[in-house]
Structure formats: C-alpha cells, structure tokens
Image (spheres, grey):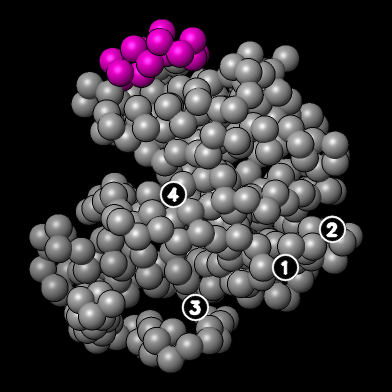
C-alpha cells in the first residue's frame, strides 16, 4: 500500500496546466515509491487525453480514460482505483508544494480522519497565502466546532474561510475513514459536488487535523467553464441545492445550519440568474427570461429558501437580498452591471 494516492481529474485542460500540475506531484521530496499518481481523463476531446497517456508512461502514473460523466464520477473513479493510506485530490489546473507528502508523513502520528492545510491563491502575478489564524482550532474536541465547520463549507461562517473547506483539494482523506463511511461523490451532481461531499465527510469526522502550511496553489486567473452559458445551469444548480437541503433535513436540527443551507440555496439561484437568465449568451427575449426567472424562484427548494429571509451582513448583500426578495429582475441586472463597473475601476487604482 502507498502512503498517498494523488487523484488528478482532467477534462480539456491546457497542456501547460496539466504538465505543471503533474511536475509538482512527481517532484515530491520523498521517495517516489511512497505515493501513486492516478490521472482520470473524463472524456477530454481537445487532445489533452494524449498528453495524459504520455505523462503516465513518463512518470509511471495510472491513467484512466472514461466517457465524460462529470467531476464527481471522475473523483469516484480515481478513489476506487487508489491504494494509498491517504487520498489527496489535486485539480489538474492547479499544483502543490514539493513537501506535501513529507508534511503529511510528519503529521501522521496523529489519528485524524481528515487533514487540512492552507493554500496560495494565484491571480496573474499576484499571490495571497491563506492560513488558519487560530492555529489550535482543531486541537479541541471536534464536536465543539463541528457546526462552524459545516457552516463554513456552506460559506456561512468565516471561522475557517482560509481553508477552502468546500473543496476537495487542500486536504487529505484517510482511506479507512472513507471506506467505513461509504463516502463517495454524488454522481448526479455537476456543480458544487465537492461542497456536498464535504458536508457528509466533515459531519462524520471524529478527529480533524491541520498542517500550518500553504501546500496547494489555486489558479484564480483562468476562466472557469462553469461561468459560461449552459442551458442546463438551472437543472445542475437545482440538483445541488436539493442535495444540500436533503443533507440538512436528514442530519441536523440545528437552526444555524438550516439557516446556512438556506443561504447556500439562495446563492445557487443567484448563480443561475447570472449564468443563465441574465447571461449574455441567453438569446431569449427579456420577457421570456424574466418569466423564467420568476418561475424559477417559485420552484423548490428556492421558494422555501428565499421565504426564510436570511439576513446576510454587509450593505451589498442587503441590497442584493432586497432585490431578490422583491423579484426585481431588471433592477438586479442593473445593480450587477454597476458592481462589475465599480470592481473594474477599483482594480485600475490598486
């Protein structure tokens, strides 16, 4: 058995992105025999699938090709093929520090179910390192911070915002913990599948560990495919919203967590609005888009989520919540344009 299994999902990436990612994994400071690399090509069709095979031969990595089924299935495929004590997910367009495995080995004396660490956001030439301020947060009884952790995954608590708890990267999952709890990604989800997975994973954790290093690099300057126009956006995000609502309904009676879930579901609908109803790629008439917007807000779980009237802090959030609460489709579009213009002006003077 390997100490670490690196699982790298790939779908139509750029060659330089994937090569940079794989190089960061193969150049670890420990012996190559201590870890395995599993590349899962999720039905790429831009030629990157050939590079996957080439890199697999060059670095003795396992390469699995499958029909395009989404990130959740790709992660599951890699997990089922892995043999490591720890499972570490690395997105193919990001990269890791050379001492990630070494750092995890040094930490391995503590029996944690999941180990998390900090990361670096890279946007062009700018870098920002994010580490946990309260270094001893995970040293206390996990049951005392569990609610805050779950709310952080739903982006409703800032206690652990530096750790990207809603992602699969930036952490290591102990294989035995995964197998004992049957923790696999929901194959029906195409958006925010990592967040839903982590809700279940962190809900069942008994011991959580933290390494005070920024061991992942997250590329924020590439254009995400999820931001483009996709006619299935409503279906994808509604499925994610239902999954979050389902988790909360089954797992807890915590008012705080239910409020966090409602805020997450509301955010799913705002994303639908930006990426579907009001997206420039949507060629439907204004009247048709507005009608679809109003109809969507009356669809569950969005209707119930907005009925909770979650109070988010901050002036911008209050304005946004007011506009959505009153279904002001046109005003929302204008407000969003103002925000974009203001953001662009601000960048010029920074």
1 or 2: tag closer to the N-terminus: 1
For the residues carrying marks 2 and 3, which lies nearer the camera in this image? 2
4 or 1: tag closer to the N-terminus: 1
Query: Marks 2 and 3, how far apart in space?
Result: 37 Å
Query: Element under label 1?
Result: loop
Is the residue 328 above or below the residue 112 in the image?
below
* Res. 218 mark: 4
Residue at image location 25% in from the left, 75% down from the top: 347
Write down the quadrant of residue 242 in the picture: bottom right
Which residues lie in the magenta part?
49-62
Task: Inspect the magenta stretch and tell me whether residue 188 lies in it.
Answer: no
Which residue is labeled 3 in the image? Answer: 306
Residue 177 appears in the picture as rendered? no
2 or 3: tag closer to the N-terminus: 2
Residue at image location 79% in from the left, 29% down from the top: 176
3 or 4: tag closer to the N-terminus: 4
Asked if labels 2 and 1 touch by Cβ distance under 8 angstroms, the answer is no
**Residue 42 location (% of width, % of height):** 38, 26
Which residue is labeled 2 in the image? Answer: 139
5 horizontally vs 211: left or right: left
Which residue is labeled 1 in the image? Answer: 134
338 horizontally vs 60: left or right: left
Is the residue 46 above or below the residue 274 in the image?
above
Residue at image location 81% in from the left, 42% down from the top: 112
């Amino acid at each position: 058995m390997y100490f670490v299994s690196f699982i790298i999902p790939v779908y139509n990436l750029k060659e330089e992105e994937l090569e940079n990612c794989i190089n960061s994994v193969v150049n670890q400071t420990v012996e190559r025999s201590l870890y395995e690399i599993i590349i899962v090509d999720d039905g790429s069709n831009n030629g990157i699938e050939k590079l996957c095979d080439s890199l697999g031969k060059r670095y003795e990595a396992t390469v699995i090709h499958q029909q395009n089924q989404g990130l959740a299935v790709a992660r599951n495929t890699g997990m089922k093929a892995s043999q490591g004590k720890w499972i570490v997910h690395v997105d193919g367009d990001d990269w890791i520090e050379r001492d990630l495995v070494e750092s995890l080995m040094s930490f391995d004396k503590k029996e944690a179910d999941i180990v998390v660490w900090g990361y670096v956001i890279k946007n062009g030439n700018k870098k920002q390192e994010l580490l946990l301020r309260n270094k001893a947060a995970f040293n206390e009884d996990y049951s005392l911070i569990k609610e805050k952790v779950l709310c952080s995954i739903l982006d409703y608590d800032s206690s652990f915002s530096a750790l990207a708890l809603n992602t699969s990267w930036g952490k290591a999952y102990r294989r035995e913990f995964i197998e004992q709890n049957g923790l696999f990604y929901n194959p029906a989800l195409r958006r925010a599948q990592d967040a839903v997975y982590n809700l279940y994973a962190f809900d069942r954790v008994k011991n959580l560990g933290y390494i005070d290093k920024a061991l992942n690099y997250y590329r924020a300057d590439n254009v995400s495919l999820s931001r483009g126009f996709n006619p299935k956006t409503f279906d994808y995000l509604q499925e994610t919203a239902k999954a979050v609502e389902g988790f909360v309904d089954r797992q807890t009676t915590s008012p705080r967590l239910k409020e966090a879930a409602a805020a997450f579901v509301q955010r799913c609908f705002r994303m639908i609005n930006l990426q579907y109803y009001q997206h420039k790629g949507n060629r439907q008439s204004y009247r048709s888009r507005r009608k679809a917007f109003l109809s969507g807000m009356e669809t569950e779980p969005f209707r119930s989520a907005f009925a909770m009237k979650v109070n988010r802090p901050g002036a911008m959030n209050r304005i946004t919540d007011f506009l959505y609460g009153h279904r002001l489709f046109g005003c929302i579009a204008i407000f969003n344009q103002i925000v974009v213009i203001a953001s662009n002006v601000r960048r010029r003077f920074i």
